[in-house]
């Protein structure tokens, strides 16, 4: 049983009066044993119900039926819209979104971590994927995500870690060994507001090489980076390892980064089907087979701080 299905079952039981308002529900581990699921699935079901106002509490204490939770439970699952998803692009994310089907709707407009956070802050998206490094704090994602909802809490869900690096021609014809060798080279540049462009610019400056995007080849995705290099329009570009290896080009590792989902907690019910698909062992196996992805923390949730 997945988290979404379990949450719906618990909501139905609460609406039917199995637990009254203020009454505690079984602990996470006991619930998992009772229904035959993992503790993580039980915790996600409880969290979804809490974020929807059905429950209050936390996995470390006890979840109880919230004041007004019975009425909220009775409305559970009624007219739940598709999750409006903005933010960064990623080949593994494309696979996840396809597997989630009609439960996810990708927000129109430019892709990219910064653009996704803006869409989230404006209410145009319920969730946004991001991989943004904050230079001042040395932290990923939290500092940029926590202000997206004007001081209201923002949930961060870890999807995976991924490896980013330089895609160069097969056989590395320009003898590029790292960012320090990019001076004077034609680079496939992602659009402003993308985490990959910000990452490459930061790494180039750290390597003593001034970025010159205006002289490069503009591209819109990781796959487009590889296409530009393969076609000879660019000498190099930043892309995930899976793209570099699948296109038969050489790939030079540069960074490992967390790829995460920033979620408006009020959209927990809409996000539940996507997270249930993410937790499926069949999908996890397909993602793990893609080079450069680490799913060991996949599904872990925290509040942006």
Image (cartoon, rainbow, N blue to C red):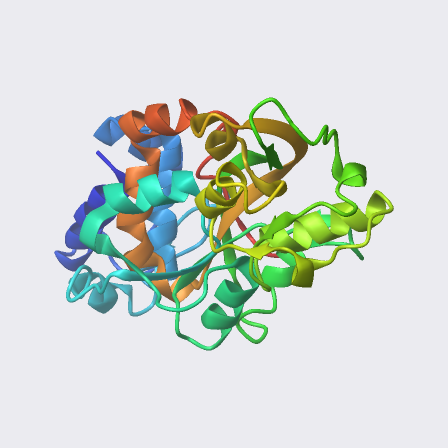
Image quadrant of residue 284?
top left
| 195, 21: nearer the viewer | 195
Q: In the rendered view, would you say 46 is above or below 166?
A: below
Residue at the spot x=15%, y=53% of the render?
A: 12
| 7, 97: nearer the viewer | 97
Residue 206 visible in image: yes
Q: In the rendered view, would you say 59 is above or below 151?
A: above
Residue 96 position in % (x across, y down)? 33, 41
Q: Farthest left residue?
A: 16
Residue 235 position in % (x across, y down)? 63, 40
| 52, 124: nearer the viewer | 124
Residue 297 visible in image: no
Q: Farthest right residue?
A: 208
Please identify the quadrant where the C terminus is shown: bottom right
Disc count in the image? Answer: 0
> On the rendered structure, is 15 left or right of 225?
left
Please identify the quadrant where the N terminus is shown: top left
Q: In the rendered view, would you say 250 is above or below 223?
A: above
Q: In the rendered view, would you say 273 is above or below 164?
A: below
Image quadrant of residue 71?
bottom left
> On the rendered structure, is 247 left or right of 193?
left
| 31, 193: nearer the viewer | 193
Residue 298 position in % (x across, y down)? 46, 35
């Amino acid at each position: 049983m997945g988290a979404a299905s379990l949450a719906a079952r618990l909501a139905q039981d609460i609406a039917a009066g199995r637990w009254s308002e203020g009454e505690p529900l079984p602990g996470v581990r006991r619930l998992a044993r009772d229904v035959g699921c993992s503790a993580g699935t039980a915790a996600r079901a409880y969290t979804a119900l809490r974020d929807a106002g059905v429950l209050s509490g936390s996995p470390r204490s006890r979840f109880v039926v919230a004041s007004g939770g019975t009425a909220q439970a009775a409305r559970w699952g009624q007219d739940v819209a598709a999750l409006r998803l903005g933010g960064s692009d990623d080949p593994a994310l494309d696979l996840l979104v396809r597997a989630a089907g009609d439960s996810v709707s990708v927000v129109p407009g430019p892709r990219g971590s910064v653009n996704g956070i803006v869409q989230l802050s404006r209410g145009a998206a319920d969730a946004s994927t991001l991989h943004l490094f904050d230079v001042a704090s040395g932290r990923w994602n939290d500092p940029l995500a926590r202000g997206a909802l004007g001081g209201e809490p923002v949930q961060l869900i870890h999807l995976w870690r991924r490896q980013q690096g330089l895609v160069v021609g097969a056989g590395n014809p320009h003898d590029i060994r790292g960012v320090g060798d990019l001076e004077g080279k034609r680079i496939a540049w992602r659009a402003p507001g993308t985490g990959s462009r910000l990452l490459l610019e930061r790494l180039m400056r750290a390597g003593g090489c001034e970025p010159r995007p205006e002289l490069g080849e503009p591209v819109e995705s990781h796959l487009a980076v590889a296409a530009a290099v393969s076609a000879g329009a660019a000498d190099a570009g930043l892309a995930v390892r899976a793209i570099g290896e699948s296109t038969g080009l050489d790939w030079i590792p540069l960074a490992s980064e967390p790829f995460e989902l920033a979620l408006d907690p009020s959209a927990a019910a809409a996000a539940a089907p996507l997270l249930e698909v993410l937790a499926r062992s069949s999908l996890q196996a397909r993602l793990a087979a893609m080079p450069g992805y680490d799913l060991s923390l996949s599904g872990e949730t925290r509040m942006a701080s």
